[in-house]
Amino acid sequence: MTRIAVLVSGGGTNLQALIGARDRGELGGGELAAVISSKADVYALERAKNAGIPGYVVARKDYDSNRAMTQALVAKLKELNIDLVVLAGFMHILTEEMVQAYPNAIVNVHPALIPSFCGAGYYGLHVHEKALAYGVKVTGATVHFVNEEPDGGPIILQKAVDILPGDTPEVLQRRVMEQAEWHILPQAVALFCQGRLSVEGRIVTIKEGE
């Protein structure tokens, strides 16, 4: 059984997609063992409670640097015997201690088709604002392993979403979540839990299922 921790900072819509996949038996044998938030009183913790998942807070404001917070997070994850870390709307840059502790065992979902509209400063609505301003016709979402470079780790899954006339950043954000993020994040987690992902440099190979 792969023990999964989901790291959150807000409402937890991607967490809800993982909970739904779990309830349908679609997490590849993975167990949602913990939800850890960088803020107290976020709705994601309520979602975790309602789903019977233990919730924890490692608050950014309690630490004087991202590094100190990262070290505290790693200590909590190790204490909980976590095998896979999922970043689901986690709004803080983690320092190298996290990647060193969980090499190719941290996944993140990004609301664009990497390498477009990604990297430092590209998060939340900013990503969709940039895509619309550039005039691209297709955007989407990417699930990737996390390394030291923001949004720079090997890509696991991607799904395209059309941009439509009259889209606002808010409307596009919702469509990307509904049509892409909420599908490929649980899929990627299931593939990891089934032992079907192998990484060679930048290339992630998905092994055939049994």
Image (cartoon, rainbow, N blue to C red):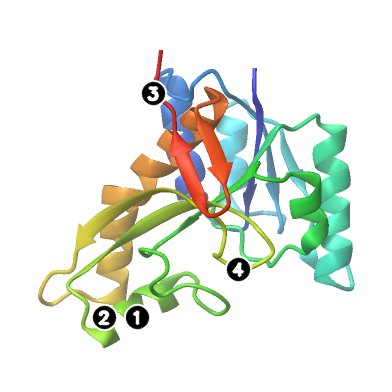
Asked whether the beta carbons under mark 1 and mark 2 sit within 8 Å of each other, the answer is: yes
Q: Badge 1: how crowded within 10 Å, few (<14), some, or many (20+)? A: some
Find residue 131 and report its image quarter.
bottom left
Q: Is residue 208 left or right of residue 148?
A: left
Report the Cα–Cα distance between label 1 and label 2: 5 Å
Q: Which residue is mark 3?
A: 208
161 or 62, which lies in front?
161
Q: Label 4 is placed on what type of residue?
A: Pro
Q: Quadrant of the N terminus?
A: top right
When the figure is inspected, residue 105 is found, relative to residue 127, above or below; the finding is above
Measured from the top left, where is residue 140 in percent x and y? Answer: 30, 60
Q: Which mark is residue 51?
A: none
Q: Badge 3: how crowded within 10 Å, few (<14), some, or many (20+)? A: few
Report the Cα–Cα distance between label 1 and label 3: 37 Å
User: Secondary structure under badge 4?
Assistant: loop
Sequence order check: which comes first, mark 1 or mark 3?
1
Report the Cα–Cα distance between label 3 and label 2: 37 Å
Q: Is residue 130 left or right of residue 110?
A: left
User: Secondary structure under badge 3?
Assistant: loop
Q: Closer to the observer: label 3 or label 2?
A: 3
Q: Which residue is mark 1?
A: 129
Sequence order check: which comes first, mark 3 or mark 4?
4
Asked whether the beta carbons under mark 4 and mark 2 sit within 8 Å of each other, the answer is: no
Q: How many marks?
A: 4
User: Secondary structure under badge 1?
Assistant: helix
